[in-house]
């Protein structure tokens, strides 16, 4: 199962809106006969990849799968039946499938006399598939909040300048994480202060830190969606997030002025709520945008979404996340600033924290996190530390909140 979890991780950043899944098949004598992972949505499921490799050796064997085998016909056929047809005698599952649509694989396997065990290395399998499991269980994307700070916890100097606290290595690492996410989010304060591009620009790996991919996958069609939380509609028309290099969504309060006309047609809905496809027979749209959100000139569209205000201040971020889930955004990489991160934490919507800590001191200046609703030590937000890694001269700490 540990190997299956390792295999599942190879799908990171490529399977959305589907889970990452790994599978190992042992023959009747306990030797590895097949391995597989889910490489992209619409591609064969991990079990099917492993069964193909195992061939006849699967008969009487054992399948280790990180997620309960599906029992439905979606983009592909049911894995429960594929396992039965291959003559698998025993199936070991780490985590049950939380979606009513696909669950039921273990029940069907048992009905047909297959020995099924569940829960093996469940914690590891949960962690590798955290984004999708959060999306499937809660109906909202998984949120990772990333920040960079000095040893004394400052993210900006007293004059407000905030760039280059961490090393080029740490910044390259951030681009790698951005590329894995379906959406990259920032607040209007960050857009006004830093004018970030919010695109993923990962460098090609030098020494191949990731294991080679075992099966080919089609290239990702769409760069991560850039989301700006801009309650009052203050995004300047010249902001880099509007440069068309990647799709952008501006989240505005219901009555705020829209800084740009709503060019989003990716789901056929207009900013006024009416539904209109607007497609032409050549696949392009009357406004020059295509169904995937790209325009005929190769640039990406800017869309607008209206989000009610939250009684505690700012927008109702839970509703914004639900809207993103509706657009099949499984994971959000939140890049600040302090006010938005504080609102997310207050509203209980941060699942993971990635902190880049530079061995440097400022002594004054702003903290990474704004008001998180804590007034006394009893209200402290405690996290579970999952990983500590050196990135160049800096440290990367990964922690998670308690989770659903
Ligand atoms: C995957 N890969 O390896 C497994 C999945 O749309 P489909 O037909 O590909 O089905 C997707 C669902 O199947 C998915 O949401 C999950 O519940 C189940 N298992 N999915 O994409 C896999 N084993
Ligand atoms: Zn399946």
Image: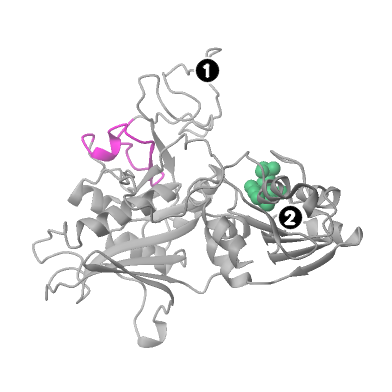
Is residue 324 inside the magenta stretch?
A: no
Label 2 vs label 1: CA separation?
A: 36 Å
Mark 2, residues whose alpha carbon is within 10 Å: few (<14), some, or many (≥20)? many
Task: Quarter of the image for the N terminus: give it.
Answer: bottom right
- Of residue 386 and residue 53, the one placed in the foreground of this image is 53
Q: Is mark 2 within 8 Å of ligand 2?
A: yes
Mark sitting on residue 69:
2
**Stretch in magenta:** 237-260
- Does residue 250 lie above or below 338 as drawn? above
The image shows residue 396, relative to residue 141, as above or below, that is below
Q: Quadrant of residue 32?
A: bottom right
Identify the residue shown where x is 36% and y is 36%: 246
As helix, strand or loop, the secondary structure at mark 1 comes to loop
Q: Is residue 104 visible?
A: no
Q: Pick the quarter of the image with the C terminus.
A: bottom right
What percent of the width, then of the height, locates residue 284? 48, 17
Residue displayed at 73% across by 55% down: 69
Q: Which residue is mark 1?
A: 283
Instruction: Kindly tell me whether residue 134 is visible in this rendering.
Output: yes
Please, what secondary structure does the residue beneath circle 2 have? loop
Residue 78 screen position, x and y as percent: 77, 46
In the depicted view, which residue is nearer to us: 275 or 93?
A: 93
Q: Residue furthest left?
A: 159
Farthest residue, direction right: 112
Q: Position of residue 255 (x, y in %)?
A: 38, 43
């Amino acid at each position: 199962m540990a190997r299956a979890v390792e295999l599942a991780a190879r799908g990171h950043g490529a399977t959305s809106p589907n889970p990452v899944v790994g599978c190992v098949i042992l023959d009747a004598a306990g030797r590895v006969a097949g391995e597989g992972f889910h490489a992209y949505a619409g591609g064969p499921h991990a079990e099917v990849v492993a069964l193909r490799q195992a061939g006849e050796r699967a008969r009487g064997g054992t399948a280790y799968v990180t997620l309960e085998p599906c029992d439905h016909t979606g983009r592909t056929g049911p894995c429960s039946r594929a396992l039965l047809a291959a003559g698998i005698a025993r199936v070991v599952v780490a985590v049950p499938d939380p979606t009513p649509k696909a669950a039921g694989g273990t029940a069907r396997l048992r009905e047909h006399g297959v020995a099924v065990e569940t829960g093996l290395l469940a914690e590891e399998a949960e962690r590798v598939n955290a984004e999708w499991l959060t999306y499937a269980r809660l109906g909202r994307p998984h949120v990772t909040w990333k920040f960079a700070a000095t040893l004394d916890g400052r993210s900006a100097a007293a004059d407000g300048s905030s760039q280059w606290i961490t090393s080029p290595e740490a910044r390259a690492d951030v681009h790698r994480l951005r590329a894995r996410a379906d959406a990259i989010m920032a607040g209007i304060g960050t857009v006004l202060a830093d004018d970030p591009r919010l695109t993923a620009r990962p460098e090609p790996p030098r020494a191949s830190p990731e294991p080679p991919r075992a099966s080919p996958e089609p290239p990702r069609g769409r760069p991560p969606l850039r989301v700006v939380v801009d309650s009052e509609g203050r995004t300047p028309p010249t902001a880099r997030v509007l440069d068309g290099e990647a799709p952008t969504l501006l989240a505005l309060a219901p009555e705020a002025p829209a800084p740009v006309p709503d060019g989003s047609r990716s789901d056929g809905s207009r900013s006024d709520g009416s539904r209109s496809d607007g497609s032409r027979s050549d696949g392009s749209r009357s406004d020059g945008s295509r169904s995937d959100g790209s325009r005929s000139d190769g640039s990406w569209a800017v869309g607008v979404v209206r989000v009610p205000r939250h009684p505690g201040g700012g927008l109702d971020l839970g509703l914004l996340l639900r809207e993103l889930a509706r657009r099949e955004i499984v994971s959000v990489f939140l890049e600040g600033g302090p006010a938005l991160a504080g609102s997310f934490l207050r509203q209980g919507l941060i699942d993971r924290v990635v902190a880049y800590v530079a061995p440097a001191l400022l002594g004054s200046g702003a903290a990474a996190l704004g008001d998180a609703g804590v007034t006394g030590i009893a209200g402290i937000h405690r996290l579970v530390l999952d990983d500590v890694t050196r990135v160049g001269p800096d440290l990367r700490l990964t922690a998670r909140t308690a989770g659903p």
